[in-house]
Image (cartoon, rainbow, N blue to C red):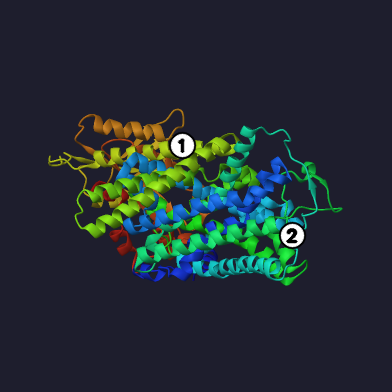
Amino acid sequence: MASSTSLAKRLLLGRPFRSDKLQHTLLPKRIALPVFASDALSSVAYAPDEILLTLSIAGAGAFIISPWITLAVAVVMITVVASYRQNVHAYPSGGGDYEVATVNLGPRAGLGVGSALLVDYILTVAVSTSSGVNNLGSVVPFVAEHKVPFAIAAIAILTALNLRGLRESGTAFAIPTYAFIALILLMILTGMFREFILGQDLQAPSAGLVITAEDDHLTSFGFAYLLLRTFSSGCAALTGVEAISNGVPAFKPPKSKNAATTLMLLGGIAIVMLVGIVVLARLTHLQYVEDQATQIISGPPGYDQKTVTAQLAETVFGAGSFLLYATGAVTALILFLAANTAFNGFPVLGSILAQDRYLPRQLHTRGDRLAFSNGIVLLAVAAIVLVVAFQAETTRLIQLYIVGVFVSFTLSQGGMIRHWNRLLRTQRDPSRRSRMKRSRAINAFGMGLTGAVLIVVLVTKFLLGAWIAIAAMVFLYVLMLGIRKHYTRVAQELEPTDERPVLPSRNHAVVLVSKVHLPTLRAVAYAQATRPDTLTAVTVNVDDKDTRRIQDEWERRQIPVPLTVVDSPYREITRPIIDFVKGIRRGSPRDVVTVFVPEYVVGRWWENLLHNQSALRIKGRLLFEPGVMVTSVPWQLRSSQDRDLDRLDRTLSRAPKRGPRIRAEVEQPPIEDEEART
């Protein structure tokens, strides 16, 4: 019968999938769009807020510039989408920016892209969940008072959904994502219809506010800097675009074509919604300030500033209407679901980096549901740390945002230029050369534009918090280099040589004795069965009475193995045994010593605290001694008979196994062997 924890796991995550079911988890375009595009699409819920909020520093008159700032962001979006369509066709394996940079610019550039994307994915989860909690908190005060626990709960739910597998998480997110798109487009079209067709003069709730600038004496340079800062804040709308190029393997065939089509749909929908919201905000004279307490001079009594989307929904659909509450609900929900883009991109990228030995190999393996479970859990833990550290404050977190994604944008486009140059040197077909030159021109323009945006972002956001993201990228870069060097060093150390292995001259067996009981007798019998050259039993004299009792029982049972007593005046156990074993090998370095350690096999976790502690210390120390082999001789206590062994198999192997346990152990190669072969 399954244990309670195993049952709970199956209820949350579902039954394990066989490896040959991987093709059934591939996504059609209608599911891939909400899975990979929820981050970029959700940006319309906070990018307009950031544009207007930053412009409010210069006063209400600066809001007139918001459509032009949005148009510049849209141009960048179009360029990036067009550039990444070239990427998914040229590199459909799922490496995305990392693969493009590694192949064309070298491993160091690829590692820089990988570290930037990993940081960006973590920030995506932290920013999206924090923003969702803040939006929900504006409606439900209890949520606003407990933002951090609710953000952590949201991350936990997203983690569980993604651990169930890619297709099921995509299905769960499809309905709210499409509902968000439909309601936002309905709001924009209805507002435009009422303004231009019906001739109604729509006024947002904040239209009549009198606001003041935070700085009334901006110089021309200061105002230009403010515009650049506004543009960099609006470029948050581009985060998530790269996720599709990293997730091409998750699409149904033809993978590249479906990924490129989904990317085009993403760009078109995101641009229409972003531009539509900002234009509608200007038509309704909507105002949104950074500091409500100091910037709003006069307004309705008890006025509480709502988000841009909430104000527009109230203006277009009417206060208290069903569509108003529906828009608010799906907006908060889409912000939570935006983190799903990172939950799909981070594990895939982590798996590729692990395959290249830049990250631990555990990130390369799939879990029960054929998802990269270890990567999903690692992302969730890192995002929770950020949420707790920044107390789920979107304003503080967003300053760290988008640096990583524009680093990857720029390096990726530079890699694509070299990719096309390399192909053009060998291609002679005129039509293909023409297509390659066109693709190269698109990528070159994309590199120039995204590089310029990266400079703007670094200049305007470095002191506001972007330096933290840069420091995290550098740390990850150095850490992954260290991991790669370690794996390379171990592989070289394990590489077989041409010399034939030297057989040990003799095998000395040592059985550790603490009491004369059944586990000890089994260990002695097993040691005899191995037929060593010499065999001795060893006990440590910590208490004279106990030692004499062991000697008397040993003689009474007439055990045909000599018992050696090692003195320990300071009551140590580990050190005397280590010295005894070293003394055996000291005479002949070609000899080996096999130490047999009797151990209890228990069925309850707390029983481990009561047994085997000395055995664990001795084994751990002996493992560092050259020429010493340690053999555990298990003795199963009655409590172990109630242990759920199938569950234990799954815990140890981290993958679903069928058939007898002994077969699973034979088929699972040691990690060291895998690395040596690689």
Identify which amino acid the numbered label 2 is placed on: Val
Q: Is residue 430 left or right of residue 101?
A: left
**Furthest-right residue in this view:** 301
Q: CA distance from mark 2 to mark 1?
A: 39 Å
Q: Nearer the viewer, mark 2 or mark 1?
A: 2
Identify which amino acid the numbered label 1 is placed on: Phe
Of residue 532 and residue 350, the one placed in the foreground of this image is 350
Residue at 24% across, 52% down: 529
Residue 249 visible in the snapshot:
yes
Q: Which residue is mark 1?
A: 475
Labels 2 and 1: the sequence-earlier one: 2
Question: Residue 257: image x %, image y %?
Answer: 36, 65
Residue at 20% across, 58% down: 429
Of residue 548 and residue 433, the one placed in the foreground of this image is 433
Residue 139: assigned label = 2
Question: Residue 309: image x %, image y %?
Answer: 67, 59
Question: Residue 621: image x %, image y %?
Answer: 38, 37
SS category of the residue bearing label 1: helix
Q: Is residue 665 above or below residue 441?
A: below
Q: Residues within 10 Å of mark 2 (few under 14, many from 20)?
A: some
Residue 430: assigned label = none
Q: Is residue 135 above or below residue 178?
A: above
Question: Residue 375: image x %, image y %?
Answer: 45, 53
Residue at 65% across, 51% down: 49
Residue at 80% across, 53% down: 208
**Furthest-top residue in this view:** 569
Q: Residues within 10 Å of mark 1 (few under 14, many from 20)?
A: few
